[in-house]
Amino acid sequence: MRKLFQVIRNIFAIEELRIRIRNTVGFLLLFRLGSYIVLPGVDPARLTGETKGIFGLLDTFLGGAFSNASVLGLGVMPYISASIAVQLLTIAVPYFQRLQKEGHSGRKILNQLTKVLTIFIATIQSTAYLTTAVPEEVIVVGRLFFTGSSILILTAGTMFCVWLGDRITDKGIGNGVSMLIMIGIVSSLPGALFSEVISRGTRGALILIVELLLLFGIVVGVVIFTQATRKIPIQYAKEMINNNIYGGQRQYIPLKLNTSGVMPIIFSQALMFLPALIANVWSDKSTIAASVGSVFSDYTTWQYNVTFGILIIAFTFFYTAITVNPTQIADDLKRNNGFIPGIKPGKPTSEAIDDVLSKITLPGSMFLAIIAILPAFAHMAGMSTTFSRFYGGTSLLIMVGVVLDTLQQIESLLLMRRYEGLMKSGSVSRRSQKSVIG
């Protein structure tokens, strides 16, 4: 405990780190305050604050702004969609690939394109949001005027969130957009825990303790899963330059067990809502369509979870294949006089890396699928809907990932100032180190 207090004192002893933490807290408070400002023309007293299905998941990410009909009702979700689209373009379109390789100038152009696309997506999503998520009875002005003005306000609110994320990245402790999503998720945790305590009562105290212990164990498992890497050893050839020997270092390529992050869950979750939407169109004309719509609208059914898990495994392999290129890694090794001990450079190296990647992607995808469907099992076990969402899925992965990245940033600043890190062994910083090829 004394070691922990010493680290906290070290953190606040560094002026730069102290300023960055203060700025981050200020920007996050500004974001949370904006989530309580209701759209003009909406009577807040008539809002129920209840959301279900995909709306409930989005409301968790946005910390209640979605159900509150807030001016920040869309949050950074349009920006996330635009970022994914641009990222896929950099993989599939040669022009965007060249921009990505141009360094700072190319990334600046891609960032501008992402923000322009964000405005376009925010306009479309705000129209859908106002049509489907804002009840008619809460609107106290003309519908046409309300829709037109609210589209502009929601789009401006999204760009304001993007601006806050940029400021946290530049003036705070980094990971601005991810930090906004995380604070939205964390802000709903106390309310979810309180509702679970109320529902259990004094007689269910033992069950509540077991639930909290299980949640702690799942979080530990997700942390291990997120940090797990498979290290491929790399040896660099020695060179004689001016009677001096250079090279010969031994490094490694760190291949993460979860290379794709939360992207497979996001893609799969988007597809899982299509059967229910399509079935609802034909539900009046076909009993089969009505049955399909009922099954895929309930995330606790076995059909939903089996399909969801299979999609996650498939998307994990797909996203890993398009983000990690073994051939390019092998070419970079060859140009830098590097090789995997016992394997010839070139194609054999590429095949060896691809073989290792395939072997770690399968268990990684299966574990990711299990994490994704855990909230359904938690809900079927009797937990409340809001509390069960923290037992896995996108929410837990985002929280763990952002917290680990934040600890890594603080650790780096402490070590730069020659302070002892957050952990005695410095394991956070060492796990984050990458080779020149990775």
Image (tube, rainbow, N blue to C red):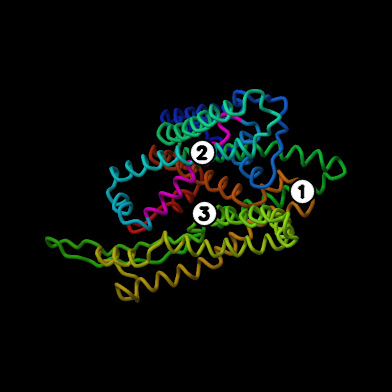
Q: Quadrant of the C terminus?
A: bottom left
Label 2 or label 1, whichever comes before in sequence order: 2
Q: Amino acid at mark 3?
A: Met
Q: Nearer the viewer, mark 1 or mark 3?
A: 3
Q: Residue at x 51, y 38 (%)?
A: 76
Q: Nearer the viewer, residue 306 or 122?
A: 122
* Whole-percent x, y for residue 192 in the image: 71, 40
- Distance from Cα at disc 2 to Cα at disc 1: 29 Å
Label 3 Cα crowd, 10 Å radius (few <14 / some 14-19 / many 20+): some
Q: Residue furthest right?
A: 203
In the rendered image, which quarter is residue 247 located in? bottom left
In the rendered image, which quarter is residue 147 located in? top right
Q: Amino acid at mark 2?
A: Val
Q: Are marks 1 and 3 in contact (CB under 8 Å)?
A: no
Label 2 Cα crowd, 10 Å radius (few <14 / some 14-19 / many 20+): many
Q: Residue furthest left?
A: 242
Horizontal side of residue 102 vs 325, given as left or right: left
Q: Please, is residue 248 above or below residue 119 in the view?
A: below
Q: Nearer the viewer, residue 19 or 163?
A: 163
Horizontal side of residue 268 vs 194, given as left or right: left
Q: Which residues are magenta?
A: 70-90
The residue indicated by pointer 1 is 383
The residue indicated by pointer 2 is 76
Horizontal side of residue 367 vs 90, given as left or right: right
Q: What secondary structure predominates along the stretch shown in magenta? A: helix
Label 1 Cα crowd, 10 Å radius (few <14 / some 14-19 / many 20+): many
Residue 176 covered by magenta stretch: no
